[in-house]
Image (cartoon, helix red, strand yellow):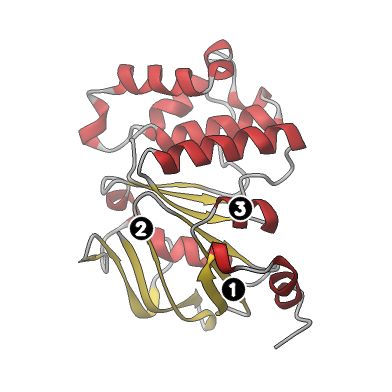
Amino acid sequence: MLELDGVRAGYGAVNVLWDVTLAARAGQVTAIIGPNGAGKTTLLRAVMGLLPLAAGGVRLDGADLAGTPTWRRAGLSLAMVPEGRMLFRDMSVEDNLAMGAYPPARRAGLAQALERAYARFPRLRERRRQAAGALSGGEAQMLALARGLMAEPRLLIVDEPSLGLAPRLVDELFELLAGLKADGRAILLVEQNTARAVALADHVHLLAGGRLVLSQPAAEVELERLHARYFGRTG
């Protein structure tokens, strides 16, 4: 579904990603893990067109996304849930959800999409008239995920979803992601909790210094070895 081939990207004269090649497939979770500063969020921004590529390519269903602006990528069954949630704090929960149905093809089905969101996240129905900035951390993460799902994307990109959440909420979050995977969605997941990410994923990539230093099926990942490479204790 999504393919990155030799991607290089960065900020101005500073290159961050070096020849990154990976794929995310329907019905699978592709996990990207790595220490702070490894280039994980930069990679997601490159996929979404928020950063230009210095080299390589990004393809969705075989189509090259070069030159496709971010706002058009949102209409290609591609959605991102950013780190830090990035909610419209002064807008209501329901208005935040409506923003997720931005692609023109989805606007006519807004009412149905809202009902699906409230079915997945009943607490949001209770809070639908409340300002997003007044939500708890767990509720805010629910809203960010629900907004990302409003357009029913086939590929969902999720950046550090468990950050700052209580263990019970982390359990609920990963149950939801597992359900989305079972529904056939492709999920590209950046996650700090390596054990949970590996348990959910089908394929795991370790990013360090802007390069992929380990890529293998999740079933073959040895957490002790993975953590050693994560913290730079082995080559």
Disc 2 element: loop
* Callouts 2 and 3 close, C-beta under 8 Å: no
Distance Cα–Cα, label 2 vs label 3: 17 Å
Callout 1 environment at 10 Å: few (<14), some (14 to 19), or many (20+)?
A: many
- Quarter of the image for residue 143 reads top right
Callout 3 environment at 10 Å: few (<14), some (14 to 19), or many (20+)?
A: few
| Quadrant position of the C terminus in the picture | bottom right
* Residue in the picture at 27% in, 51% down: 72
Residue annotated with mark 3: 199
Is residue 114 positioned above or below 76 on the image? above
Is residue 17 positioned above or below 73 on the image? below
Residue type at tag 2? Arg
Q: Earlier in the sequence, mark 1 or mark 3?
A: 3
* Residue in the picture at 57% in, 26% down: 90
Measured as percent of width and height from the top left, residue 124 is found at 55, 19
Residue type at tag 3? Ala
| Quadrant position of the N terminus in the picture | bottom left
Measured as percent of width and height from the top left, residue 167 is found at 76, 37
Residue type at tag 1? Leu
Measured as percent of width and height from the top left, residue 103 is found at 27, 38
Residue annotated with mark 2: 25
Measured as percent of width and height from the top left, residue 172 is found at 63, 32
Distance Cα–Cα, label 1 vs label 2: 19 Å
Distance Cα–Cα, label 1 vs label 3: 18 Å
